[in-house]
Amino acid sequence: VYGNATEQIHIAAQNDRFTLEDSEITGSLNSLQTGNAAVLLAGTEASIVGNQISHAYTGIFSSGHQMTVSRNLVTDINDTGIAHLAWADTGSVFEDNRVLNAFTGIHIGNGGGSNPAFVGNNSAISNRGDGFWASGNVVMTGNESRNNRQAGIRLHGGLAENNVVSHNQDGIVVGSFTHSAVARGNRIYGNAK
């Protein structure tokens, strides 16, 4: 899928249980503008699995509940490689993805969710901002974040456990004025601060 004016694939709300699998999605010149995503999802229980996504403003942007985003390679993105911003999510899963050369690698926000969003076994490498940014009810475990220009992991709420964070500007930045967070059992080395 390539060369469309804005989003390459847009699945609106009420289109539940959509699956996008084993596809190559490349943005166009217009999709590099602010707000355009290669894959834009608002439905519930969607699965985005095994895709190669590149050259867009945002790689994957989802706002639905119970999403499964796994085994995707996301590269050369102007803003965020994988973004999920949902209110009261009920347990989305983001695992085994690899994001390279975006601004923020993976940004997961789950405000008010009864079940945490799970972020596991992903890699965020050589991004221009943060490798991972989690806010709200998010559990991050088994991820690798390295060679990012800002924080390896920025955690505003939730839990970061058993991650490997190396050679970033900051290792793990925990908490904010409004959100507490827990980081434990992580391997952190070679960061500038």
Image (cartoon, rainbow, N blue to C red):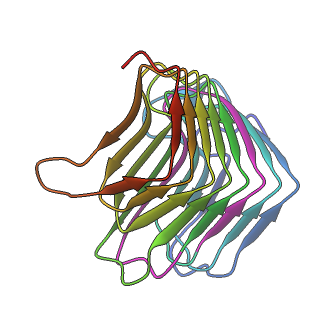
In this rendering, position of residue 25 left or right of residue 94: right
Residue displayed at 42% across by 64% down: 138
- Asked if 97 appears above or below 99 in the picture, the reply is below
Q: Name the image quarter holding residue 136.
A: bottom left
In the rendered image, which quarter contains the N terminus? top right
* Residue 30 image position (x, y, % from top left): 57, 28
* Residue 80 image position (x, y, % from top left): 50, 38
In this rendering, position of residue 159 left or right of residue 156: right
Q: Residue furthest left?
A: 177
In the rendered image, which quarter contains the C terminus? top left
Of residue 118 and residue 30, the one placed in the foreground of this image is 118
- Asked if 179 appears above or below 153 in the picture, the reply is below
Q: Is residue 105 visible?
A: no
Residue 68 included in the magenta stretch of the image: yes
Of residue 193 and residue 68, the one placed in the foreground of this image is 193
Residue 46 included in the magenta stretch of the image: no
Of residue 107 and residue 121, the one placed in the foreground of this image is 121
Residue displayed at 35% across by 48% down: 155
Would you say the magenta stretch is mainly helix, strand or loop? strand
Q: Residue furthest top?
A: 192
* Residue 191 image position (x, y, % from top left): 47, 21
- Asked if 81 appears above or below 189 in the picture, the reply is below
In the rendered structure, which segment of residues is drawn in magenta?
Answer: 67-91
